[in-house]
Image: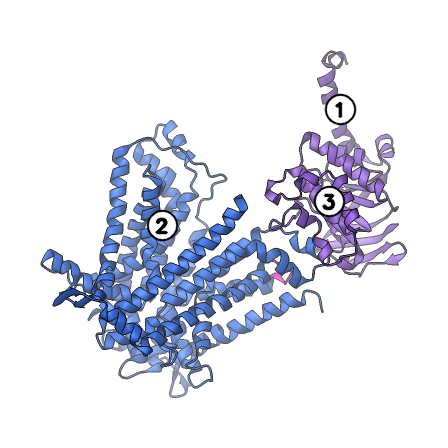
Amino acid sequence: MLKLEHIKKSFDGVNILNDLSLDIPNGEIVSILGPSGSGKTTLLNLILGMSDVDSGRIIFNNEDITHVPMEQRGFNIVFQDYALFPNLNAYENIIYGLQNKPNISSKEEVNELIHLLGLEKHLEKRIDQLSGGQKQRVALARTLVMKPQILLLDEPLSALDGVIKESIKERIKMIAKEYNLTTIIVTHDPEEALTLSDRVLIINEGQISQYGKPEDIMNQPSCDFVQDFILNQLEIKRRNIFALFHPMQEQMV
Amino acid sequence: MKKNFEIKAIYWFIIVLFACFLVLPLGSLLIQSFQSQGNFSFANYIQVIGEKGFLTALQNSFLVSGLSALITTFLAFMMAYAIHYTNIPLLLKKFMKNMTMLPMLLPTITYGFAIIYSFGKQGLWTKVFGHQLFDIYGMSGLLLGYVIYTLPIAFMLIHNAMEYIDKKFIIVSKLMDDNSFKTFVITLLKPMLGTLAAAFIQAFFLSFTDFGIPASVGGQFEVVASVLYNQMLGSIPNFANGAVVAMIMLLPSVLSIALLHYLERYNIRYNKISTIEFKKNALRDVFWSLIGLMINVFVLAIFMAIFIVPFIQMWPYDMSLTLNHVEAVLMDPALIGVIENSLIVAILTAITGTFVVYGAALAVARSSIHPKLKKVIETIALVTNTVPGMVIGIAYLLIFSGSPIQNTFVIIIVCNIVHFFSSPYLMMKNSLMKMNAGYETTARLMGDSWFKTILRVVTPNALSSLLEVFSYYFMNAMVTVSAVIFIAGARTMVMTTKIKELQHFAKFNEIFVLSIFIFIINFIAKGLFYYFTHRKKREKTK
């Protein structure tokens, strides 16, 4: 279990996160959802250890890790732009971490990952020869080789289009289940958050608007913000899509 | 704190380096200029300015630099226009471009001697035409030399800027019923104004502070650079007055660079660069190729003398061909030693310079060091850009005379690194800034230490920029004369300073043979760098 207790963070006197507390159970997919400037990326960076909290505590499996440096926390991240190293090919990127920690994953485990993510055919390719979805999968594989305790994903779907988006979603779900891996995803897209995760954390202006299962959020929005910005957006989408499938029906309504 | 220890150490190393070899020397130069018999006074300034001829020299400098910058900017613009706005065959365009850049491979001091042997009383072209076309000593010789010297730099600036002009606006302008002149003004001249001004200022600055050209063809026409040289290394050296002249030379330099930075704001940036197909127009293409080639031919005509004179028995009296002069240089251990020295200095400058630049750029572009501390490095880059080589050389002469590094390669190498720091630093910084911000975090999460990240990820991806920095330092170290002339000792003499010395003895064959060596070395180096950069690119597209 990852526990955040009274987290505060400000930059240049501006409060970004204001007394934030929440628990994330092991093995769950949790999405952090909010508009830009809501503090969601800051929260991700704090969990990862890229930046330090001003006050409050971060506790992981009953251990206080507030002051543990990033590389010793055992968490890992896939950045929005993947940060794949262009001087190495896909395979060399995947096994990058093995040079430092040769025993962290066995050859079989790496191959299994490659198979799971459907990357067999792309291993020899240079990074700029890969499509967006392939890059995303290579970056996922590279991170999973390190067997992170928590996997952090920063806007994992925003650079992808259409069908690819759905297939990556499925892979993320599958991997979380397969490895019982706590996965924290930052996104600004309500549809993505609500269809991908076990729990959704909605934050706005540095504070939690609602934290709960997708169905709770759909059925019992906690405040106007959730209603206006999250649910209404989905409502408009739903109407548009329904209209596409049943033009006549929609007209009658 | 242990966090980021490595990059902090590198940062402070660079700060200390520039404190010792930039701030300290320039500071002491400033103090020296205000010191008279141990007291603070303006006496030196009053004396220098009151000296006969100084104000004339200053005036001359402004006049001839300004005029040559004007001509250079105009020529460079035409050349760039011919390349970007016509359908001249690609191969010819490449030829024109490379020919324009050619003078960069030679030191400026050689330009002057090339002019003498082209248009002087016994010059190549004087012989061909049967009479001297113009008097080369003084104004016209300087003009010619400065234009040749600054043309490649002005051309490069304008050429690059033209590449980033969105050519689609020509179509928009035409569709709006503009006439040709208006289209030219609105789609090219106006967007280029900032760059043209920058090219002018850069050409002015380079001419104003150059020492090599006045040293050879200045004649009785005194400019600030020759006054400065005579104060320091003339028959009666006067260091205090030299310091004053150096400070006065610094002033226009600082002003011109400040102006450059101010002008940068007015550069127009297009969101997107699109190319268009130019209409078929054979007349236009022929016209512009002739313009371009004429400029090329003119520059080549001047340099031709360098490659002919040393192979003639005794110019212009015994015109039989010979290799004697080349052999004589190759047999002369002193000259061979000088060639070796030059190579040592250039290679070591390139290696150490690349490390210094890389370290500085890493600290600024890829570390969490406090922005105010980063600003210090940015300021250093700005200052090194404004300080003329001669001023650095004199400052070093004043402060390091009698120190253990006097007359060593170390002082020359450090001087080159400091003098040429600005451009390669900016090049490196920009390239590192463009690199994905997540590399370090990702590598660290994969268990890399800082050094390992730099070694495994950042450096391989910065390789082509590093090569460019290396090449920039190498070439400039090969051709520079302005600063080294003051600090090269008898045992550390490099080719360019040797050329200056040979001038005293009127040994022009040796001068030209050495110049050819510099040219060949730079040419080979350029070829090698080109090969390595393109091999990398080829590998990528494989």
Image quadrant in which the C terminus of chain A is located: top right
Give the SS element for disc 3. Answer: helix
Q: Looking at the picture, how far across and down is residue B12, in whole percent?
A: 59, 70
Report which quarter residue B287 is drawn in: top left
Q: Amino acid at mark 3?
A: Leu
Q: Colour of chain B?
A: blue
Q: Amino acid at mark 1?
A: Arg
Magenta range: B366-371
Relative to B28, is A42 above or below?
above
Q: Colour of chain A?
A: purple
Q: Residue at x 48, y 55 (%)?
A: B532
Residue on which disc 1 sits: A238
For the residue pair A195 and A249, the one nearer the viewer reads as A195
Chain label for disc 1 = A
Q: Horizontally, is A58 left or right of B311 in the view? A: right
Q: Is residue B355 highlighted in magenta?
A: no
**Same chain, labels 2 and 1:** no
Residue on which disc 2 sits: B196
Q: Amino acid at mark 2?
A: Leu
Relative to B54, is A44 above or below?
above
Q: Residue at x 28, y 73 (%)?
A: B329
